[in-house]
Amino acid sequence: MKKFDINIDIGEGFAIEKDLMPLIQSCNIACGGHAGSTNEIKKCVVLAKKYGVKIGAHPSYPDKKNFGRKSLQIDKKTLAISIEKQLRLFLKNLQSTEDLHHVKPHGALYNDCVKNKQIAQIFLDAVIKCCPGVVIFTLQESELKIKAQKKGFKVWTEAFLDRGYNDNGQLESREKPGALVSDVRKMYAQLKSINMHNSLLTINKKSIPIKADTFCFHGDHPKLISNLEKLLELCSNQKNNE
């Protein structure tokens, strides 16, 4: 298996960071929209730097009540101001602005940036104002990817190891069967298929092409640490058997 990058959403109040940092290569730190605070950001940044983990900002719809997982019907200006505010809070609490590697939208904002041209543009405009030199994390089939590349941004396409995919390459809605993957061997099979063959099986058992520069686990996924440890053990065993 080729070398791979794993990213995790952190700073969301689950107190997983100390155990998690030695296991990952990139992190997405909540910056006040769906979760997060000044203290959380600072703690996460210190840990990430200690373990050499790439640092990312993780802005969201301003919706702590629903953990940023519902699309908000708010006007364009309000959304733009919120995203900019989150990014500026994040930058303010970095030891150096050069420490910021990437920006990745969270939850419903992530999904809307994939499908909605207007939302993707609002998000990208905020990034351009606040931190124009960053990498953008998004899905392979994404409006945000198209717009970001046109503006000269480097884009890392992302695949999810704890989520099921539709035949169109987008994530299945969390409320539907097959949306959440909890079996470590299924996660490993998904990682191996994408990493080695640039393909995966959808929830309908259809093979679709997909490439990924980074692989995501959600920070609130049950048994995250143990699942990740088991996954890395499976990868290590395969390498040793080659």
Image: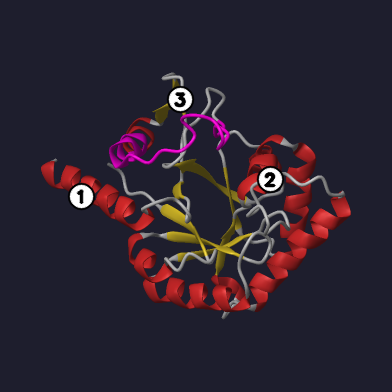
Asked if the stretch drawn in magenta spans residue 12, the answer is: no
Q: Nearer the viewer, residue 134 or 67?
A: 67
Q: Earlier in the sequence, mark 3 or mark 2?
A: 2
Task: First in sequence, mark 3 or 1: give its number.
Answer: 3
- Horizontal relation, residue 161 to residue 170: left or right: left
**Element class at badge 3:** loop
Q: Quadrant of the C terminus?
A: top left
Q: Would you say residue 43 is visible in this rendering?
A: yes
- Amino acid type at circle 3 is Ile
In this view, 242 is above or below 167: below
Q: Which residues are magenta?
A: 170-191
Which residue is at 49% across, 34% downward?
179
Residue at position x 65%, y 38% in the image: 114
Q: Is residue 87 left or right of residue 154?
A: right
Rendering quarter of residue 181: top left
User: What residue would you read off at disc 3?
Assistant: 203
* Residue at 40% from the left image edge and 31% from the top image edge: 198
3 or 2: mark nearer the eye: 2
Q: Which residue has dot 1 on it?
A: 236
Q: Nearer the viewer, mark 3 or mark 1?
A: 3
Residue 108: image location, x then y, percent: 66, 45
Disc 3 to disc 1, how far (Cα)?
27 Å
Q: Predominant secondary structure in magenta?
A: loop
Q: Is residue 179 magenta?
A: yes
Distance between the Cα atoms at labels 3 and 2? 22 Å
The x, y position of residue 7, in whole percent, is 45, 55
